[in-house]
Image (cartoon, rainbow, N blue to C red):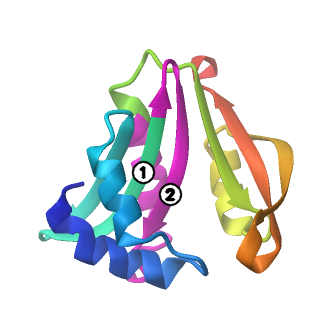
Amino acid sequence: MAEDDLDEVMAIEINSFKSPWSRVSFLNDLRRSDAISLVGDCDHHVIAYLVAWQVKDEVHIGNLAVHSDWRRRGLAQDMIRQLFIHRSYLRWAWLEVRKSNKTARRLYSKLGFKEISVRKNYYEAEHEDAIVMAKDLLQD
């Protein structure tokens, strides 16, 4: 992901989430040395993105979205696999997902993530819990 991608990233973000990240949040991540910001593109247009943060041998997936016209084609799965592909030294991957987001929870389960705990009222604006999911990357 580059700063030039942010108009398209923001359009996907706003269309995908009830409480979207701000443009400043994405800019800040682009400048962080521990952030991993990836985009998937087609014909020079962003169709998916992923933001994660690495701490030693762990990675925390913070944001993942696919343009509505491109959903259900395996792009989210591909983005997660791209995150891991050149990082064989990673041991754990973590993320939070809305309790109500059954589609995402199924995807993460399919990729080997396990539901390990609940963060009560994590999504404060909507008063919704988050499911914390983790994947042991050495199990693959």
Q: Please tell me in which quadrant of the rendered image residue 122 appears.
A: bottom right
Residue 121 in the image: x percent, y percent?
83, 64
Q: Nearer the viewer, residue 112 or 118?
A: 118
Instruction: Verify CB contact (< 8 Å) between mark 2 and mark 1.
Output: yes
Instruction: Measure the C-alpha gap from mark 2 to mark 1.
Output: 5 Å
Q: Residue at x 85, y 43 (%)?
A: 117
Which comes sooner in the sequence, label 2 or label 1? 1
Question: Magenta includes 62?
Answer: yes
Q: Residue flagged by tag 2: what amino acid is it?
A: Asn
Give the magenta range: 54-83
The secondary element bearing badge 1 is classed as strand
Q: Residue at x 14, y 66 (%)?
A: 4
Q: Which residue is mark 2?
A: 63
Residue 42 can be seen, yes or no:
no
Residue 9 can be seen, yes or no:
yes
Q: Which residue is mark 1?
A: 51
Residue 44 in the image: x percent, y percent?
12, 69
Q: Residue flagged by tag 1: what amino acid is it?
A: Val
Q: Residue at x 24, y 77 (%)?
A: 7
Q: Nearer the viewer, residue 67 or 18?
A: 18
* Other residues around mark 1 within 10 Å, as few (<14) / some (14–19) / many (≥20): many
Residue 32 in the image: x percent, y percent?
33, 41
